[in-house]
Amino acid sequence: MLNQEQAFSNQRNILFEWVVQTNYTLFSFSKPNLTISTAQTFFLNLSQKGRIRWDGDLSVNWELVSDLSLKTSFYHNYDKKSPATLMPRLDYGFVAGLSYEF
């Protein structure tokens, strides 16, 4: 993969990376109506020695009652050598919400 990064200082880097990605989704249409999915992506940087990145997401959608669902998602991003500091950087978060379809 070819990736272009641009820092706030307008410094641009063009990077070559090797990418491995996995996706998995599990559906349950009986009670409870449930969908669980995950996507994990690993980036091995070929331009900057020792730099790896990992992005991932895990999502759950659970239909509580007809047309009303609880949605949750956990995400994470890891960069072994962040362009700004050249130090490891980890970002993660959790999102939850209700949705109604009509």
Image (cartoon, rainbow, N blue to C red):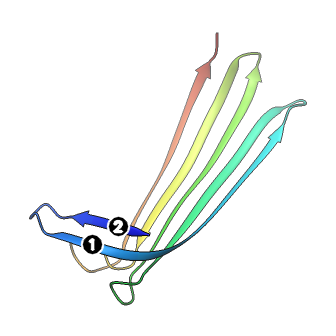
Q: Quadrant of residue 8?
A: bottom left
Is 1 in front, or is 71? 1
Q: Earlier in the sequence, mark 1 or mark 2?
A: 2
Where disc 1 sits, the SS reads strand
- Is residue 8 or residue 11 the one in the foreground? 11
Report x, y in % for residue 39: 61, 56
Q: Residue at x 40, y 84 (%)?
A: 46
Q: Position of residue 67 (x, y in %)?
A: 71, 16
Which numbered marker is on residue 26?
none
Q: Are marks 1 and 2 in contact (CB under 8 Å)?
A: yes
Q: Please say if 70 is above or below 37.
A: above
Q: Is residue 93 above or below residue 88?
A: above
The residue lying at 60 percent from left, 40 percent from top is 72
Residue at x-position 26% and y-position 65%: 5
Q: Return the residue at label 2.
A: 3
The residue labelled by disc 1 is 14
Q: Quadrant of residue 77?
A: bottom left
Point out the residue furthest to the right here. Answer: 30
In percent of width and height, residue 9 lies at 9, 64
63 sits to left or right of 11: right
Amino acid type of the residue that numbered disc 2 sits on in the rendered structure:
Asn
Which amino acid does the dot numbered 1 rest on? Ile
| Residue 73 higher or lower than 70, as above or below | below
Q: Is residue 69 left or right of residue 86?
A: right
